Each structure stands twice: as C-alpha cells, then as structure tokens.
Image (cartoon, rainbow, N blue to C red):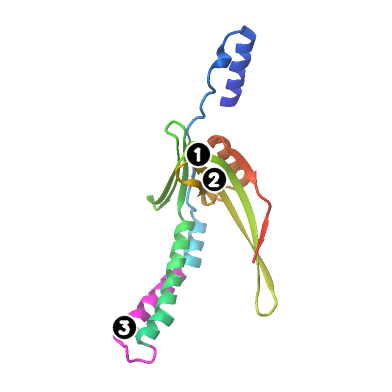
Amino acid sequence: MWWHSQKTDHEDANDSGSDMNNEPPRSLPDKDFTSDPPAGKSVFAMLLVLGLPAVIFGGAGVALMVFSIRNPDHEDGGLAGVVCFGIPFSFIGLLLILTLRAALSAYRLRVQHSIDRLVFESSFLGRGYHSEDRSLSEAVYLEYTESWYERTDEDGRTTRRMSVEYIVHGHSSEEGEWELGIEDLILRFENHREKAGEIAEAIGIEFRESDASEGV
C-alpha cells in the first residue's frame, strides 16, 4: 500500500543520511467507488411493491384530471376534482416512481486527486441523471449520522424509524461550507461503516461518527 511504501522510503532516507526527507509527501492515487443496481428477485420485488402502485396511482391521477377538465359541471369534476383527486393521486404516483428509480440506480464516487475533483454520479439503466462535482482539496471530513424518528398514531401506538446519512463536509473560500451526501452509494455495501472509512482514507480526510439524534 502507498502509506507503507512511503514510510519505508523515509526510513531508508534516514539511514543513509540523504535529504529525501525534504521531499514533499506523495499524493494519494485516484480511486473510484461504484455500486451496481439490484438484480434478480430484488428487482422483481421492487417492481411489484413500487412499480405497480406507481402505475395505478399515476394513471388514476391523470385520468381523474382529464375527467375533471372535460366535465366541469360534474359533481366530482371541475377544479375540485383536479385539486382533491387528480393532483394527489398523480403526486403519489410520481413519488413512487422516483423512489423506484433511486432503488434501482447505480452510484459512483470518483476521487480524482490528479485533477482535484470529487464527483458523485447517479445513473439509471446506464444513463446518468444526476451529478455533483466538488473540489477535492476543499473536503474536510466524512460524517456518519444516525437519527431516530418517533411517531405516535391516534391509537397510542408508537413506531420508530431510523435514518442514516453519510455526508462529506467541505469548505470553499468562495461558497463557504458545503455538503455532499453519498449515503445512496455507501448503504449498498454490507459493512457500510467500513466502506465509509475506506472512502475517507481514499479522499485523505477524517471519518467522524456523530451521536444518534432523536426526531419527532
């Protein structure tokens, strides 16, 4: 590994009395971290759980809006039909589609020391649909945050939900503090904390684990 070879070089320099210790430290190598989209039974389950309801709600929403516009005098038509039925159903369908796309997407984090860039990319069916680009030298630390949210229903039953975030924090002299969320990539790995430490090491920054916080 690079850090072992660097240490050996310096030890040799000290033994020989040369001035190699005055050389600048070696730069970190470029590295890519990628996650493949789910396959097989996982895809079928997601299509069944998310895809089918998305089609049903989205289709129903569009149909209701068309019906309401064409039949403004109907008791369920007009503006009330669009606002009360068409838009909510369409919104649910869109939300399910976006959730399905995120679940079936592939993610890549490009750590490019050679050109001082940190790039996070998202792709669906081989086509990129989102990309964030930051200056690698501005990155300060990678933070792991685990939050718990509690909700109590009308019957008094309380449910708890955990939310996990992995965020690269940085500072720019022009933009100030910035954040780059990469949990979509890291959570695809079985031991995500270990992978987060590997990513922080590749970037050359500290990995911090924040205390769990409570939410409502």
The front one of 61 and 178 is 178
Q: Position of residue 6 (x, y in %)?
A: 58, 21
Extreme residue in the left direction: 70
Q: Callout 1 environment at 10 Å: few (<14), some (14 to 19), or many (20+)?
A: some
The local secondary structure at tag 3 comes to helix
Q: Where is residue 14 in the image (x, y as percent from the top left)?
A: 63, 12
N-term-proximal mark, 1 vs 2: 1
Q: Nearer the viewer, mark 1 or mark 2?
A: 1
Give the magenta range: 51-76
Residue on which the image places disc 1: 138
Q: Residue 106 carries which label?
A: none
Q: Quadrant of the C terminus?
A: bottom right
Q: Nearer the viewer, mark 2 or mark 3?
A: 2
The front one of 19 and 198 is 19
Q: Quadrant of the N terminus?
A: top right
N-term-proximal mark, 1 vs 3: 3
Q: Can residue 56 be seen in this view?
A: no
Q: Callout 2 environment at 10 Å: few (<14), some (14 to 19), or many (20+)?
A: many
Residue on which the image places disc 2: 168
Q: Distance between the residues labelled 1 and 2?
A: 10 Å
Q: How far apart are marks 1 and 3 (CA)?
A: 52 Å
Instruction: Say whether residue 9 is magenta.
Output: no
The local secondary structure at tag 2 comes to strand
Is 49 drawn above or below residue 41 in the view shown? Answer: below
Dot 2 amino acid type: Val
Residue on which the image places disc 3: 69
Q: Nearer the viewer, mark 1 or mark 3?
A: 1
Dot 1 amino acid type: Glu
Q: Distance between the residues labelled 2 and 3?
A: 47 Å
